[in-house]
Image: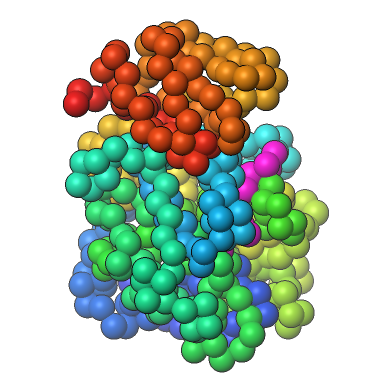
């Protein structure tokens, strides 16, 4: 829905929407946003500025412009698990998550055909992509994945890992320049504030204008996955949509239900119908306009919001199960792109890889990569940030004859090859 309202109304709406955190809260971003609005005058200024810019931008500009590519770094936080096990997720799973994120933002998700016909026309390819960062803020070559043992942060597993604690003790020490990267923190758990109950939060994000130290997203590690490569810890949230949802917040999207108690709130987007929302997970009825589980289209509730004949529960900014999410809308696309043209404008000037195909060892040779059971070779000049997944113990052969396994390799062609844990190789052809 689209009502031009001031930020004051937003604050009131969010206050009305605050609920006791249930046993499992899909997302905590909107509550953190309210707290930040109350405590951080600079955030209020930045949000007001961005809302004004977004409204102007949406009115004046055709949003079907160039494709934006956002360098992304995944920070894996663990407590000593061997590389690729437990909390120390394998790079292959993170690559699968990145691929799902790109499919979702590009309307290339394999379940896009589940979008009901009535919403097909507003389902958007956002023209926003995400790539693994190839350079650290200091200019060093990177795989785009960092791994940090909690002991180096002075963090204990037994501490209360609530959002404030995570911001201070995990995000701030590890954050890469928030103006140039999307920082994704992958951690074991997110506790409710003060550990006042035993509940868990699945993820949270910083809205644009947030303080530099925590301007990223946080997701729990069992949510990392993809439709075709689900997280091995099986659940309804194993398919990567928590990350898609939180990145939506990072690009200024609100929950589709508007975060108002009883539903029908404003998400500042015109082509998403206002919605009543379904029962919360503990069965207390409509709470803040979100839906849970996997509803059937067309979905309405008694006392449905005026004008709504079907709720867009399959939107990534609802709370339904991962496999039942299928779309962003054109209005959401415009809102997100306005952020990149506004407060996150530095991202536009980053150069990175993003959409080069992710090749896998198994199966027949793909593209320019040729593999056998014992080695693969590249039959062409490397492209910037080519990515290939290589199983542990396999050997990679570049056409000039050099090989790599689990360490950095420099080749005569002028490229630099970085192999992480025998799992991910990222090629950067910048001169060195
Ligand atoms: Zn959310």
User: What range is drawn magenta here?
Assistant: 220-229
Judged left or right of residue 338, residue 219 is right
- Residue at image coords 43%, 69%: 150
Q: Position of residue 105 (x, y in %)?
A: 51, 40
Q: Position of residue 430 (x, y in %)?
A: 24, 25
Which residue is situated farthest in the bottom direction here?
A: 196
Q: Is residue 223 magenta?
A: yes
**Residue 198 seen in the current view:** yes
Question: Number of callouts in the render?
Answer: 0
Quarter of the view holding residue 408: top left
Q: Position of residue 344 (x, y in %)?
A: 27, 50
Majority secondary structure in the magenta region: loop
- Residue at image coords 72%, 69%: 278
Quarter of the view holding residue 374: top right
Position of the C terminus, as image quadrant, is top left
Rendered image coloring scheme: rainbow
Q: Is residue 392 magenta?
A: no
**Residue 327 seen in the current view:** no
Image height of 178 relative to 431, above or below: below
Image height of 310 relative to 396, above or below: below
- Residue at image coords 36%, 71%: 153
Image height of 332 relative to 422, above or below: below
Q: Nearer the viewer, residue 126 or 303?
A: 126
Q: Nearer the viewer, residue 263 or 302?
A: 263
Judged left or right of residue 272, residue 304 is right
Quarter of the view holding residue 427: top left
Q: Position of residue 68 (x, y in %)?
A: 35, 35
- Residue at image coords 27%, 45%: 136
């Amino acid at each position: 829905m689209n009502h031009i309202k001031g930020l004051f109304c937003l604050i009131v709406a969010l206050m009305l929407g605050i609920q006791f955190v249930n046993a499992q809260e899909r997302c905590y971003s909107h509550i953190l946003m309210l707290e930040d609005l109350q405590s951080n005058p600079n955030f209020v200024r930045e949000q007001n500025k961005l809302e004004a810019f977004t409204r102007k931008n949406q009115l004046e500009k055709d949003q079907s412009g160039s494709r934006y590519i956002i360098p992304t770094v995944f920070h894996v936080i663990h407590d000593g698990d061997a590389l690729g096990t437990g909390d120390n997720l394998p790079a292959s799973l993170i690559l699968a998550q990145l691929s799902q994120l790109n499919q979702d933002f590009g309307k290339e998700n394999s379940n896009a055909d589940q979008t009901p016909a009535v919403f097909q026309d507003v389902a958007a390819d956002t023209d926003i992509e995400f790539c693994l960062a190839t350079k650290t803020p200091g200019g060093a070559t990177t795989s785009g994945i960092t791994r940090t043992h909690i002991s180096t942060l002075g963090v204990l597993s037994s501490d209360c890992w609530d959002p404030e604690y995570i911001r201070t003790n995990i995000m701030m020490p590890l954050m890469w320049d928030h103006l140039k990267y999307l920082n994704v923190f992958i951690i074991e758990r997110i506790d409710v504030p003060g550990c006042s109950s035993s509940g868990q939060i699945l993820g949270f994000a910083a809205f644009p204008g947030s303080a530099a130290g925590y301007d990223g997203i946080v997701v729990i590690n069992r949510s990392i996955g993809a439709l075709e490569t689900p997280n091995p810890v099986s659940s309804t949230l194993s398919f990567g949509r928590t990350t898609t949802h939180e990145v939506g917040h990072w690009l200024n999207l609100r929950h589709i239900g508007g975060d108002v108690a009883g539903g029908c709130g404003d998400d500042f987007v015109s082509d998403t119908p206002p919605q009543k929302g379904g029962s919360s997970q503990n069965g207390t009825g409509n709470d803040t306009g979100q839906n849970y589980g996997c509803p059937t289209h067309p979905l309405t509730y008694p006392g449905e919001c005026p004008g709504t004949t079907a709720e867009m529960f399959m939107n990534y900014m609802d709370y339904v199960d991962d496999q039942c999410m299928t779309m962003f809308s054109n209005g959401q696309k415009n809102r997100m792109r306005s952020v990149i043209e506004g407060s996150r404008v530095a991202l536009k000037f980053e150069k990175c890889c993003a959409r080069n195909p992710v090749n896998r060892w198994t199966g027949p040779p793909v593209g320019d990569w040729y593999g056998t059971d014992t080695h693969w070779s590249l039959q062409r000049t490397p492209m910037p940030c080519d990515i290939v997944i290589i199983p542990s113990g396999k050997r990679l052969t570049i056409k000039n004859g050099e090989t790599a396994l689990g360490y950095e390799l420099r080749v005569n062609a002028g490229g630099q090859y970085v192999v992480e844990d025998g799992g991910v190789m990222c090629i950067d052809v910048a001169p060195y």
